[in-house]
Each structure stands twice: as C-alpha cells, then as structure tokens.
C-alpha cells in the first residue's frame, strides 16, 4: 500500500501544477466616463480651463488619459477646453468618454491644466478684460472615487469656484486650487434647490443698507446637524487664515442666490447638512474669515438629511428654524 501511494504522489503533484497554470479569473470592469460642472460665481463672463491629461491613481497601476472628445464630433484631440460658467446647476460636460475601468477604489483623479497661457486657461471679467489662470504644480489633485459593478457610471467633477478660485492682485491673475472640488457619481448625487423670498434680501440691517438688494445673497451649506448657529462661518481656508478661531465651522460649500431668489446646489454626496442663508455675503473672501453673520436673518437656517439620488426643495423664509425641508 505504501508503495502504491508513493507511485501516485508524482501524478497528484503534476495534476495540481497543471490546474494552477490554468487561465486567471478575468478582471471585473465597468464602463465609466468623467464630466465637469460648476457652481455660479458673480461678476465674471467666462472661466476657461484647458486640460491636457487626466490621471487616475490606483496602487501600482495608474490610468493615464491624454485623448479627449472633440466638441465638433470629429477625431479625438490631445486637449479639451471647458468654460466652467457654461455648466451651472445640473449641467455638465463630458471630458472623458466612456471607458472600461477596473472595479475598485481609486485614490485620486488628477487634472493636468495648461496654465499661465492666457489663450488656453483664463478668466474674462465683466468689464475688466481677460486675466490668466495659474494652477499650482500645473494640476488639480481631486481625491478618490470608487468604481462599482454594473454601470455605465458618470463621475462629475463639481467646481465650486467661490472656494476653488481666488484673485491674485500682484501678478493680476487668478489662482485655481483643488479646494472644495468634489467628485460625485451622477447616479448617487443628491440635490438641494429652492427659492428665497426677495423680501429677505434687504429686510433688516445690515442688509437693508445694501445699495443693491440683489447682491450678497448666498446659501451656505455645512456638514452635520446640531451645529451652533453662532459658530457658522463664511468661506475661509484654515491653512491660510491662521487667525480664524478654532471654534468656527467651515462651510462644505456655498451657492449664490439668483436675482429672482432661486438657487440650486447640485452633485452632493448623501449626508446630513445644515443650510443657512445670508443676505450680507457680497464680500466673502474665500480664504479669510470675514466675520459675516450667518444666518442673516438669524432664524433662516434648516437641517437636511439627503439620501443617494434625492432631490430636496428648501424654500426661504423657513417658518420654524431647524425644521427639515420638504
């Protein structure tokens, strides 16, 4: 019996090795495309960027994209130019056509921007001419995203320009940073929209002192519930404004209210939020705490819970502070 087992061992081992050399399981992929959108910013006619490379970072396996769809429907091109101000609200523009990507986590998406070239990436000011855009390190590093099974998936890169872009007066140019830019799956993105009664624009001081009631009306969105209203801050960058109090709560994002009172905050991840209105935010520096009182009037804030894909309507004035929108 022992001799029989010894004779069979080489055959068993050979069979195991042959099984191990068989075809590997196929890598699971899903169809994915990428697009850009923008939140409105005032006093500008155009914010144009030209992208010449998109890099998707995965451990040991980066995906580099350097061919982009042509606006005229012709052959792909080696750059793509986008005017972000054309893509407000839920509008977006596809910058990377549908491609198969391996399912899993991606640490970063990086946009390489042709910058300091006033013909490729620039800002057109209302009545102020054209100014170049500078992008530190020539790229925007935007954080991670996850590709799941199924699809097709569209990931939108939402540019809140009131956070991401600042004016640099010395060289007379604009600086575009990744701050506040979010990467959100269209199928998972939530949305808040509503209308502010224009009577809130200049109903009480300091807003009643504004020379133009339609200016400075802003919705501020904060992450979380049970926030202290007297600690809700205007836009500021803690890495820049070292004098800002540690107790201040930085907005997640903000959105200008249109002259007719309408607003929309699109491409939001599901979460708990606090939405507050200010009628006195015309001079909100995106890097420094300006001491703007939020909310103004004091009772105009509301707590919101958003689920994936949910659209919620929040009209102001709210009748009971803190009540969730319908």
Image (cartoon, grey):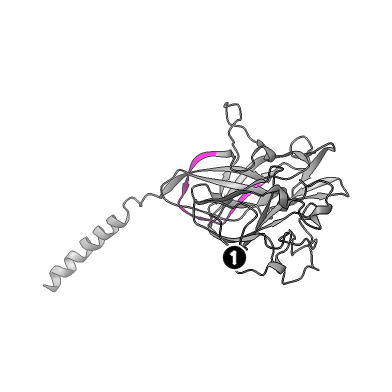
Q: Where is residue 97 drawn, in percent x and y?
A: 53, 38
Quadrant occupied by the N terminus: bottom left
From the viewer's perspective, tell me whether residue 289 is left or right of residue 319: right
Specify the farthest residue to the right.
170
How far from the left and from the top, in percent, is residue 122?
Answer: 76, 39
Residue on which disc 1 sits: 224
Question: Which of 91 and 278 lies nearest the eye of the viewer?
Answer: 278
Q: Taking 125 as reference, is 200 above or below it?
A: below
Residue 194 position, x and y percent, is 61, 48
The answer to which image quadrant residue 72 occupies is top right
Magenta-highlighted stretch: main secondary structure? strand
Percent of width and height locating residue 115: 75, 43
Badge 1 element = loop
Q: Is residue 118 visible?
A: yes
The magenta segment is 97-111
Whether residue 229 is in magenta: the answer is: no
- Tell me if residue 101 is in the magenta stretch: yes
């Amino acid at each position: 019996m022992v001799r029989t087992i010894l004779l069979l061992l080489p055959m068993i081992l050979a069979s195991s090795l042959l099984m191990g050399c068989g075809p590997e399981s196929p890598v699971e992929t899903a169809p994915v495309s990428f697009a850009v959108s923008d939140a409105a910013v005032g006093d500008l006619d155009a914010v144009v960027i030209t992208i010449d490379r998109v890099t998707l970072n995965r451990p040991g396996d980066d995906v580099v994209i350097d061919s982009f769809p042509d606006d005229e429907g012709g052959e792909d091109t080696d750059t793509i130019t986008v005017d972000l101000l054309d893509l407000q609200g839920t509008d977006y523009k596809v910058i990377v056509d549908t491609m198969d990507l391996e399912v899993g986590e991606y640490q970063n998406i990086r946009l390489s921007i042709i910058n300091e070239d006033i013909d490729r990436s620039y800002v057109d000011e209302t009545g102020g001419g054209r100014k170049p855009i500078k992008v530190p390190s020539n790229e925007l590093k935007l954080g991670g995203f996850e590709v799941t099974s199924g699809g097709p998936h569209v990931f939108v890169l939402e540019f809140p320009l009131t956070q991401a872009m600042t004016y640099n007066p010395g060289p007379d140019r604009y600086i575009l940073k990744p701050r506040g830019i979010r990467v959100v799956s269209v199928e998972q993105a939530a949305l808040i929209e509503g209308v502010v009664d224009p009577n809130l624009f200049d109903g009480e001081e300091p807003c009643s002192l504004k020379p133009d009631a339609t200016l400075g009306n802003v919705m501020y969105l904060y992450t979380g519930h049970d926030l202290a209203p007297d600690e809700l801050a205007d836009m500021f960058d803690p890495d820049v404004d070292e004098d800002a109090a540690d107790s201040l709560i930085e907005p997640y994002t903000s959105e200008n209210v249109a002259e007719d009172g309408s607003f929309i905050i699109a491409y939001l991840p599901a979460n708990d939020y606090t939405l507050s209105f200010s009628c006195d935010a015309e001079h909100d520096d995106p890097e420094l705490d300006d001491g703007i009182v939020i909310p103004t009037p004091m009772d105009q804030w509301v707590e919101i819970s958003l689920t994936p894909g949910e659209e919620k309507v929040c009209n102001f004035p709210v009748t009971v502070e803190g009540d969730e929108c319908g």
